[in-house]
């Protein structure tokens, strides 16, 4: 079974290499704007496999930021009249209110969590008309540990999830992300 998975990974990796970094960037951007059934972590793993840890990380980070920003702006600019029936639902109103009051550190931690649906965050932030600067700062900080998580996991999925040290490292990354975003928010007065 693992041989079959390795063969699939090799085929996709060779295909990505043939497109170069632009191919890796495009699959991440497209997945951030239009999330297909494959999780973002899979594409990050492919980028790392095709281009190495450092280049794969950079491609994935830039692609994720661009894709999330495009998605956010599309929903921010969409006339809310298109979503009138949707916006009248009580759960939607509560979600939009929570999103409007989210702080940069909270947004950073939310986007740092590897299994948070980024598309849902982008859409709800856009529809809630969240401040663009706040959104960009929050995702720029939060996406770093999220992508590091997938790079780390992607290197050896089987070994990573069975090792308690790996789990502690992941928790540490999330705590550090929260603390850094709090400190940067105070230093640069980013509370928007």
Image: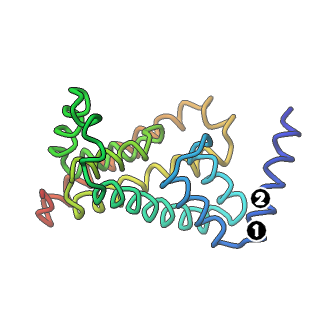
Looking at the rendering, in which quadrant would you find the N terminus?
top right
Residue 171 in percent (x, y) is at 41, 38
Q: Report the side of 84 relative to 21 (left or right).
A: left
Numbered marks: total: 2
Q: Which residue is mark 1?
A: 17
Q: Position of residue 157 (x, y in %)?
A: 66, 39
Residue most extreme to the top? 90
> Which one is in front, 69 or 153?
69
- How far apart, in angstroms, are the residues tagged by discs 1 and 2? 6 Å
Label 1 CA crowd tier, 10 Å (few <14, some 14–19, many 20+):
some
Which colour style is shown? rainbow
Which element is circle 1 on?
helix
Note whether 84 is above or below 80 in the view shown: above
- In the image: residue 140, left or right of residue 169: left
Q: Is residue 182 left or right of residue 25?
A: left
Relative image position of residue 85 (x, y in whole percent): 27, 34
Disc on res. 13: 2
Along the line of sight, the residue nearer the viewer: 111 or 67: 67
Can you tell which mark lies on residue 151? none
Indicate left or right for 173 with 95 as reference: right
Locate the C terminus and report the quarter of the image it occupies: bottom left
- Residue plotted at (28% across, 56% down): 76
Q: Quadrant of residue 185?
A: bottom left
Query: Which residue sits at x=49%, y=62%?
Result: 61
**Horizontal and vertical percent position of residue 163:** 60, 32
Q: Secondary structure beneath disc 2?
A: helix
The residue located at (25%, 44%) in the rendering is 106
CB within 8 Å, label 1 to label 2 = yes
In front of the other: 3 or 24: 24
Image point 35% across, 47% down: which residue? 123
Residue 186 lies in what quarter of the image? Answer: bottom left
Question: Within 10 Å of the Cα at label 2, are there few (<14), some (14-19), or many (20+) other Cα atoms?
Answer: some
């Amino acid at each position: 079974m693992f041989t079959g998975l390795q063969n699939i990974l090799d085929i996709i990796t060779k295909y990505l290499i043939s497109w170069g970094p632009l191919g890796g960037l495009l699959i991440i951007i497209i997945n951030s704007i239009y999330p297909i059934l494959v999780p973002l972590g899979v594409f990050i793993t492919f980028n790392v496999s095709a281009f190495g840890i450092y280049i794969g990380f950079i491609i994935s980070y830039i692609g994720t930021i661009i894709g999330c920003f495009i998605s956010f702006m599309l929903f921010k600019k969409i006339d809310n009249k298109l979503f009138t029936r949707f916006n009248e639902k009580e759960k939607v109103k509560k979600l939009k209110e929570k999103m409007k009051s989210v702080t940069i550190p909270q947004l950073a931690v939310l986007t740092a969590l590897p299994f948070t649906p980024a598309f849902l965050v982008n859409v709800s932030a856009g529809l809630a008309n969240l401040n663009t600067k706040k959104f960009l700062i929050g995702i720029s900080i939060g996406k770093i540990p999220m992508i590091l998580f997938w790079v780390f996991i992607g290197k050896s999925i089987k070994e990573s999830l069975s090792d308690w040290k790996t789990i502690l490292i992941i928790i540490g990354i999330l705590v550090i992300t929260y603390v850094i975003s709090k400190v940067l928010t105070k230093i640069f007065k980013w509370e928007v």
